[in-house]
Amino acid sequence: MPKRNDLKTILIIGSGPIVIGQACEFDYSGTQACRVLREEGYRVVLANSNPATIMTDPDFADRTYIEPLTVEVLKAIIEREKPDAVLPTLGGQTALNLAMALHAAGVVGHPGTPELIGANAEAIATAEDRDKFKQAMIEIGLSVPRSGIAHSMAEADTVLAEIGLPVIIRPAYILGGRGTGIAHTKEQFVSVVSNGLSASPINEVLIESSIAGWKEYELEVMRDRADNCVIICSIENTLDEISNDITKKTPASFEPTIDYVVTKVPRWAFEKFPGTPGVLGTQMQSVGESMAIGRTFTESLQKALRSLENGHLGLNCDPSEDVYRSRSDDEMLAMITVPTPERLFQVGECLRRGIALETVYDACKIDPWFLDQMSMIIEERHHLAGLTPASLTSSQWRRAKRLGFADAQLAYLWKTPETEVRRLRIAAGVLPTYKAVDTCSAEFSAQTPYHYSTYEDETEVRPADKPQVIILGSGPNRIGQGIEFDYCCVHASFALRDAGFETIMVNCNPETVSTDYDTSDRLYFEPLTHEDVMNVIEAEVATSGREPHVIVGLGGQTPLKLAGKIPAHLVAGTSPASIDLAEDREK
């Protein structure tokens, strides 16, 4: 679709402060929108109240308003800037709710007012209003659970009488599942419905028959005006008009072919709130997430788990498993019936004890395919426990690493220092290779240096032409370490690139601008552990013949804790000794 020349100025509504259910992924999408719209020649006006974001930097929009995101403030901005269109789809629930409020007030989406682009008021209402969404699904022939809409407790009781318990309650126009819940008893029903009606700005809840235990498939579909479909996004160009930024050769309509597995794991922070039950339900409670890439699911899963920085080294071979030693098999099976942040590790403990996979499935309802994959890790652990690190052959080392075992896990299993495990592995000639992320299983060469580690024969890292600087990112968001550290890392990358260095980012947070494929000259999507960081450093030395400098001072506590484990002469900026002096309370 040709560029719309009738639009000159576009107002983007940001997402405001970081909250559970609405994190830094909207800074990522908003930054991309500002960049693309300005490249197309539009004047971009941004409204956002979060100064710790990349998108609020002066370089990303022509005019930026760091103001409260309220209807009154946005009205004033619209009156002053006179935008031709308002883009509300990049600011999460906050922006969508504001767009609907502005539309209801007659400020946008009406003749003579700025147009709502990306999604108009009708589309937003259909997606956010539970009743309208249900009717839209029925109209296209999809089956939906038995359900009813309620605007009061009396109406809710009427719906319950028709459906019966258990039920799922979902309010309309809410953020991160706020006010949602599953009710198994009448008392729970009254409590969840009351909370849901209060949470919904239009006092509406959808009450559905519970489908807990069903298998869920989340399909993100991108569809254009010519009915080409690949993945989700609201777009106006046909897919054959958009180039793939990764390969630079294929259009977006080229069917993706993937030879790697991506695993994302939420990061919860219940440890910050002692006494909270820590039970997971329909309401979002995670504060961040980690992501890992591997050739197999087992490799990807173990990398993602050790990326969480919550004390776990992987799925097993982990000091945290000691807490289960005093538990009986029946107690363990009872524990995995309740969804908690620790359930995956509890399931691993059940499998390690030899409890039948079918019995574990009956208790936790996790799909047997995943349980089978976890069993492969457990079986390898039992095999490795009967060996010594000095006796392992190269093929045995390689098999363990392909299943995702970290050196730290093997050190725990063998009661051997991690440095010794690392030395023996390297002596056996087992080193990671780095593959490039593409969308075509290497049918076309990837032009974007976006890498992940695995244990194969050939690396795809190209030699650097300039002196390299590695920036260690901040890992998954959590309380005390948020988007402001990503902001620092991104600006360091921009500044170093301008100064003539080859910038290399190492991070495992998929929500951030730092892990955008074009923020740095090279991106390693890897856990921020001693082993993984040293592997990256050694890979850069092997391909480029020179040692890179490493910046550890911009990503918060995550890279600071690694400073003393990296060769001191490589650390740029504050020395490891000075960092230790500042961090050690006694010193």
Image (tube, rainbow, N blue to C red):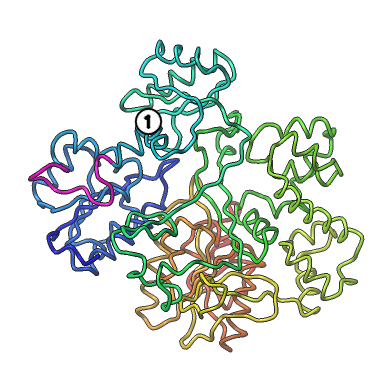
Instruction: Residue at 40% x, 22% y: name it.
Output: 149
Instruction: Residue at 27% x, 61% y: name it.
Output: 34
Circle 1 SS class: loop
Kind of residue sitting beneath label 1: Ala
Residue 255 picture location, percent across and down: 48, 67
Q: Give the labeled residue for mark 1.
A: 172
Residue 382 picture location, percent across and down: 87, 55
Left/right of residue 576 with respect to residue 241 in the rendered view: right
Dividing the picture into quadrants, the one containing residue 577 is: bottom right
Magenta range is 108-122
Of 170 and 485, which appears nearest the observer? 170
Instruction: Residue at 42% x, 34% y: name it.
Output: 138
Of 91 and 54, which appears nearest the observer? 91
Instruction: Residue at 83% x, 57% y: name it.
Output: 381
Of 311 and 403, which appears nearest the observer? 403
Question: Would you say the magenta stretch is mainly helix, strand or loop?
Answer: loop
Magenta segment: does it hold 488?
Answer: no
Quarter of the figure with the C terminus: bottom right
Quarter of the figure with the N terminus: bottom left
Left/right of residue 250 with respect to residue 339 in the rendered view: left
